Image (cartoon, rainbow, N blue to C red):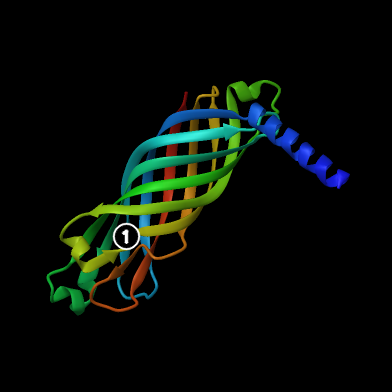
Amino acid sequence: MKRIVFALVLCCILSGAVKVAAEPRWGVVAVGNYSTLKFNQNLIGVDHGFGGGVGLIGEIIIPGIGFAVDGSVIYSLYTSNVHFGDRKVWQNDGFANERLKNHTIDIPLNLKFKYTNLNGVENVIAPLAYVGPSFTVHVGDNSHGASAVSYKRIAVGIHVGLGCELFRKVQVSASYTWGINETLSTMKLDDFEAKNKYWRLQVAYMF
């Protein structure tokens, strides 16, 4: 019984120490997306498209260890050019090479490691790497092209990224995201669905 009480007291002390030591920061973030759709069958061609977004970011750092967790809420636009005109099933409905626009609210969560043991160099530049899930909520789309598809309300992906922090204020990074579940399905064909995959360039300014 004494061991259990001691363990609980020790956990509380350590938990309190982490809370005191943790350094929360907030900032604004801008992103650029280079995205495509990966269909589960090779029936039509798809070209990459450019999009972007803006939002807010929060970060909690554990000093001396180099680890941090962060989360963002970002309005984001994804585009891709889908060659519906390759198949008569869409040709007959007047579709050709359609540029799909997917407006979303992204919520990426990261476990981040920032290398800070650089004898003071980290005050100017500190390399960082991160990995985590990303939750994408569909909030809108373009009218004509999107009438050929039905967007899922929520899509989930996994991303990894590399970058650096400059002057302890500006974080610049690049990441790649793999869709886990489908982003959309077509209206005309059953079981013809696509996952979103994209490169992202991100710049954040931390206050």
Nearer-the-camera pick, 128 or 62? 62
Nearer-the-camera pick, 65 or 46? 65
The single residue placed furthest to the front in the displayed view is 1
Q: Is residue 188 above or below residue 139?
A: below
Q: Is residue 206 above or below residue 160?
A: above
The single residue placed furthest to the right in the displayed view is 2
180 vs 153, left or right, is: right
Q: Amino acid at mark 1?
A: Asp
Element type at mark 1: strand
Q: Position of residue 158 (x, y in %)?
A: 50, 55
Q: Position of residue 184 (x, y in %)?
A: 32, 65
Q: How many marks?
A: 1
Q: Residue at x 31, y 46 (%)?
A: 51
Q: Residue at x 25, y 58 (%)?
A: 100
Residue 193, by quadrant, is: bottom left
Q: Which residue is mark 1?
A: 47
Nearer-the-camera pick, 128 or 9? 9
Q: Position of residue 165 (x, y in %)?
A: 54, 30
Q: Is residue 30 above or below residue 124?
A: below
159 vs 68, left or right, is: left
Residue 93, by quadrant, is: bottom left
Q: Residue at x 30, y 72 (%)?
A: 44
Q: Position of residue 140 (x, y in %)?
A: 25, 53
151 vs 196, left or right, is: left
122 vs 206, left or right, is: right
Q: Residue at x 52, y 28 (%)?
A: 25
Nearer-the-camera pick, 162 or 111? 111
